[in-house]
Amino acid sequence: MQARASGVLLPVFSLPGPYGTGTLGAPARQFVNFLADAGQKFWQILPLVPPGGGDSPYMSASCFAGNPLLLDPEALADEGLLTHEELSSARWADPDRVDYPWLHKNRAALFRSAWERGRERYAEALDQFLAAEQDWLPDYALFLALRERFGGAELAKWPDEIRLRRPEALEKARRELADTCQYHAFLQLLFFRQWTAVKAYANGKGVSIIGDMPIYVSPDSAEVWAQPELFQLNGAMAASQVAGVPPDAFSDKGQHWGNPLYDWAWHKKTGFAWWRRRGAQMARLYDVVRIDHFRAFHTYWAIPAGAADARAGHWEQGPGLDLLDALKGVPGLALIAEDLGDLDAGALDFIAKSGLPGMKVLVYAFDPDGESAYLPHNCPQNGVMYTGTHDTPTFVQWLFEQASPRERDFACDYLRLRGDEGFGWGAVCGAWASPCRLAVAPLQDLLGLGGDARINAPGTMGPQNWSWRVRAEALNPSVSGKLAHITRTYRR
């Protein structure tokens, strides 16, 4: 990212289309075309892993697997894996929201049909894929097969002989669930084939992909089950401390995420081998990777497992530059640090020493009395300027629902906001004018959308999170042309 450039943030599930969620098919390619027409060099997405608790991609059952819900049903029909009747059954009337309960139920039946038709045709390719992904895929497939056997129960409620991986019980499960394991591996093969094709198409259009690496994994995950040595767990695989953050701008009680914390001493002893494997996969899937919650490399918030909320936590020392050096040693892995939140002097010094570009967010910039580091004129070249993120309100929502009158006045004066132009476009111009080599806006800010289009409100649960979708008619030449003009004007 040496030259000035810009891009748009849009989760894959937010793409338009008739199948209940965005997919890795025509909608993804059409959005790439929109970006190319708009002069954009980057498409930033959220993690492609299967969503977990609360439908969050940051609470996944695996940090290596892909999300089969994003598979393109039309491509499966083209390959003869689905019939036209089954393809019709995959359609969903609501174009504005992902309905996850319906989606899980619908796709489970369709994917089983696809497996029955594809098991012989894909047998050789599946064997090769399983061998190539031996480090994680067999354990993940067995984890999902066992979860199905136990009626969807979370890992903590599995029978001890399986939860604690007693060899005889595991071997018996592998024999009895072999077909189900093959089925789940088959879905992963299809996913990575489709994603690889989307990325190649984007790169061919001059658009690079910014992916996202969640720092933590779910307590109900294949990693916790298959590799408990990675985490701070006791002999019964229970955590004494879990992850979160202290009280901050998002929550006066902090955030109690509940993820297991890493055993950093063990990781250091192995030369961070698991992290290097993870980084290598990220380098294959994306052109640049945003490291979520990067400050935990320096210090992380540890909450007693039984605590009511995050206020009971305390800071502990993270792996530091040793882990970052291990990741920097992965060929082709370019990184962005998500360095938001309340950072003390030590954390700020660590982020500076890392040399990674950090994030500057416009909706946090407009303190009318102070000199914010997020005001565009204060942002460094080695940074990424965002109008907002998936965790913030949209710019228009912030401006009219959350900003104080003085903050709103300052933002309007600073950005020269005009209603006839569109307040979101004013925010884009402010970000694009910054010295940062890269500027990114969520698509909602290009479209001037309000709170209904927010992706996630941290610390909350419900169907409004991780479900917003854009309509196809919004991705029109008027929008792409306006963005292209702004991008040329600010030499991006």
Image (cartoon, rainbow, N blue to C red):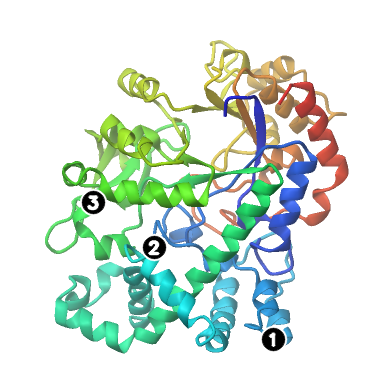
Residue 161 locus on image (x, y percent): 17, 77
In the rendered view, tell whether residue 142 sits above or below residue 274.
below
For the residue labelled by badge 3, is the local secondary structure a helix, a strand or a loop?
loop
Neighbour class for label 1 at 10 Å: few (<14), some, many (≥20)?
some
Q: Which residue is mark 1?
A: 83
The answer to whether residue 433 is left or right of residue 362 is right
- The amino acid sitting under disc 3 is Ala
Task: Name the residue rendered at 31%, 33% in the picture.
Answer: 325
How far apart are the two marked residues, 1 and 2, measured between alpha carbons? 30 Å
How far apart are the two marked residues, 1 and 3, measured between alpha carbons? 48 Å
Location of residue 328 by image quarter:
top left
* Residue 261 seen in this snapshot: no
In the rendered view, tell whether residue 465 sits above or below residue 443.
below
Please name whichever residue, 352 or 201, is drawn nearer the observer in this view of the structure. 201
The answer to whether residue 286 is left or right of residue 13 is left
For the residue labelled by badge 2, is the local secondary structure a helix, a strand or a loop?
loop
Neighbour class for label 3 at 10 Å: few (<14), some, many (≥20)?
many
Q: Which residue is mark 3?
A: 305
The circle drawn on residue 61 is 2
- The amino acid sitting under disc 1 is Thr
Q: Earlier in the sequence, mark 1 or mark 2?
A: 2
Q: Earlier in the sequence, mark 2 or mark 3?
A: 2
Task: Name the residue rendered at 40%, 56% in the picture.
Answer: 63
Please name whichever residue, 438 or 231, is drawn nearer the observer in this view of the structure. 438
Instruction: Kindly report which numbered mark, 1 or 2, lies closer to the viewer in this rendering.
Output: 1
